[in-house]
Image (cartoon, helix red, strand yellow):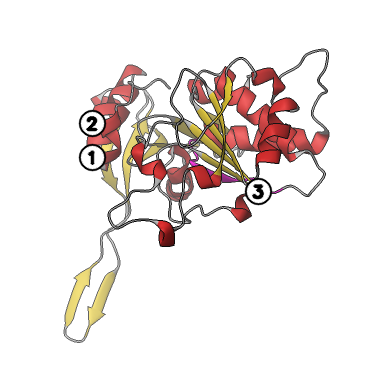
Amino acid sequence: MAVQSATFADIHLSEEDIKSRYIQPALEDKGWDKFHMLLEYPYTPGQIIVQGSMKHRKRGKRVDYLLFTEDNSPIAIVEAKDRKHAPADGIQQAIDYAKDLDLPFAYASNGEKFVEHDMNTGAERLSKEGAELLDIPYYSDSDSYSPRYYQRIAINKVIEAVACGKKRILLVMATGTGKTYTAFQIIHRLHASGRMKRILYLADRNILIDQTMRQDFKPFRKVMTKVQGKNAEGGFEIYMSLYGQWVKNEKEMQPGEKQPYESYAKDFFDLIVVDECHRSSIDEDNTSDFPFILIP
């Protein structure tokens, strides 16, 4: 389902703003007019809470959108979230509502993409943009090899998560299973889609960066650079760097001094891949707007 293009300010919009600016116009564009749609539809009155001589009723269950067919039969609900959430974050809530109301379809959206759940088959489907991302092929040339079955599974799971709007992904693979090659194929597919044009790859040692650039990441050689010092400017698309070039030890910093990464806009990179992430200082509460792929 198509939606209007997002803007930088959308991350600050309320859920109601997202609904009025993006979700409702997208529904209307698909033919769901005011005669086939109910907004903020309540379907339970809410539990009564008694405390001594006082009592009050909690808010009942309500759905953001209830969609009807031509014969006025409810067919689907749409759960809305703001842009601080991924599109799929609301799908379980939507499924619970659809079960209560015995509806065949449940949808969730943050105004950027829609995720569909078929209650009869259990199948989930992405928006057109998300589905197209899944169709991007693996990199292949005369010197490369096809992913092994477990690498293929890992690559596809990450791509599916990104297609569903996930912002932070942890990929765990054992030593010797081809983590760097797997990361290359993930980056290739996301880069080839056109959605992630500036990508940062982090490792903890120079030897790993140099080896990665010479071997698995060799197909990126025309658009790839190794960050020198703390300067990631330039017309490149794949940036290879060390953790220490972005985060300094706080004990070594002067009062008022900023961390190197703070000199860049939050959306400077479309994607950050952190290899050997257990050696890094990535903040668990990080809320960056671009995806992180963490590989321990």
**Which secondary structure, mark 3?**
loop
Whole-Å distance between the Cαs marked 1 and 3?
40 Å
Question: Magenta stretch mostly in which secondary structure?
Answer: loop
Mark 1 Cα shell of 10 Å, populated few (<14), some (14-19), many (≥20): some
Dots 2, 1 in contact, CB < 8 A: yes
- Residue 54 spot, x, y in % from top left: 16, 80
Give me the residue at 40% from left, 43% from top. 260
Mark 2 Cα shell of 10 Å, populated few (<14), some (14-19), many (≥20): few
Q: Residue furthest bottom?
A: 52
Mark 3 Cα shell of 10 Å, populated few (<14), some (14-19), many (≥20): some
Residue type of the residue flagged with mark 1:
Glu
Dots 3, 2 in contact, CB < 8 A: no
Q: Earlier in the sequence, mark 1 or mark 3?
A: 1
Residue that carries the numbered disc 3 in the rendered image: 276
Residue 83 is at least partly visible in this image: no
- Residue 148 spot, x, y in % from top left: 83, 32
Q: Which residues are magenta?
A: 164-172
Q: Is residue 173 left or right of residue 275?
A: right
- Residue 256 spot, x, y in % from top left: 27, 54
Residue that carries the numbered disc 2 in the rendered image: 20
**Which secondary structure, mark 1?**
helix
**Which secondary structure, mark 2?**
helix
Give me the residue at 46% from left, 30% from top. 232
Quadrant housing the N terminus: top left
Q: Residue furthest left?
A: 53
- Residue 252 spot, x, y in % from top left: 42, 58
Residue that carries the numbered disc 1 in the rendered image: 16
Whole-Å distance between the Cαs marked 2 and 1?
6 Å
Whole-Å distance between the Cαs marked 3 and 2?
42 Å
Residue type of the residue flagged with mark 2:
Ser
